[in-house]
Image (cartoon, rainbow, N blue to C red):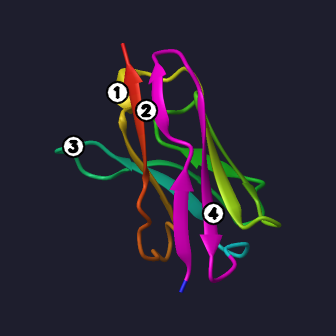
């Protein structure tokens, strides 16, 4: 079983930046595509961005395209989400997971963007 732990969230002003980390333990994720998801109160979980196992290709949801970047370091079993030009509508709990074969969800990390 792979355990996922997100970190790096916090409170930032609109226009600011954050980098989230997702560390996997218990099993390697180096052979899996990984994705970032977010969920705001009262809303469904939303796909944010994903990255293939090699890290050479990424995809993004329309709401974050051009602002967020997914990367990974397979030697550290870690996936990152660089978030730039944050907007209040980005406020949510952010999670990572395998988009093609979900593992148990981690605790997520809260991102709050103020106006």
Q: Nearer the viewer, mark 3 or mark 2?
A: 3
32, above or below 62, in the image = below
Q: Which residues are magenta?
A: 2-28
State the CA–CA distance, disc 1 to disc 3: 12 Å
Mark 1: few/some/many CA within 10 Å (<14, 14-19, 20+): few
Which residue occupies 69% across, 61% down? 78
Q: Residue furthest right?
A: 75
Q: Are marks 4 and 3 in contact (CB under 8 Å)?
A: no
Taking the image as shown, residue 54 lies to the left or right of residue 15, namely: right
Counting from the top left corner in percent of width and height, residue 6 is at 53, 56
Q: Nearer the viewer, mark 4 or mark 1?
A: 4
- The residue that appears at 44% across and 66% down in the rendered structure is 106
9 falls in the magenta region? yes
Q: CA distance from mark 1 to mark 2?
A: 9 Å
Calculate the distance from the C-alpha at mark 3 to the C-alpha at mark 2: 17 Å
Instruction: Measuring from the top left, give residue 45's x and y in whole percent.
Output: 31, 53
How much space separates mark 4 and mark 3, taking CA atoms? Answer: 24 Å
Q: Which residue is label 3 attached to?
A: 41
Query: Where does the image place residue 54, in percent across and percent down from the top left?
Result: 78, 63
Q: Which of the two labelled residues, at mark 4 and mark 1, occupies the earlier sequence position? A: 4
Q: What label sits on residue 23 in the rendered view? A: 4
Which numbered circle lies on residue 114? Answer: none
The dominant secondary structure in magenta is strand
Question: Marks 1 and 2: CB-CB under 8 Å?
Answer: yes
Say whether residue 32 is left or right of residue 8: right
Residue denoted by label 1: 89
**SS type, badge 2:** loop
C-beta proximity under 8 Å, tags 1 and 3: no
Q: Residue 8 at x, y = what percent? A: 56, 43
In the rendered image, which quarter contains the C terminus?
top left
């Amino acid at each position: 079983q792979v355990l996922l732990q997100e970190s790096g969230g916090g409170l930032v002003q609109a226009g600011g930046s954050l980098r989230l980390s997702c560390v996997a333990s218990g099993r390697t994720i180096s052979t899996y595509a990984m994705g970032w998801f977010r969920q705001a109160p009262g809303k469904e979980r939303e796909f944010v961005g994903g990255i293939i196992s090699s890290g050479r290709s990424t995809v993004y949801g329309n709401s974050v395209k051009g602002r967020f970047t997914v990367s990974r370091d397979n030697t550290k079993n870690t996936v990152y989400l660089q978030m730039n030009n944050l907007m209040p509508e980005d406020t949510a709990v952010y999670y990572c997971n395998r988009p093609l074969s979900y593992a148990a969800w981690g605790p997520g990390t809260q991102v709050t963007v103020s106006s």
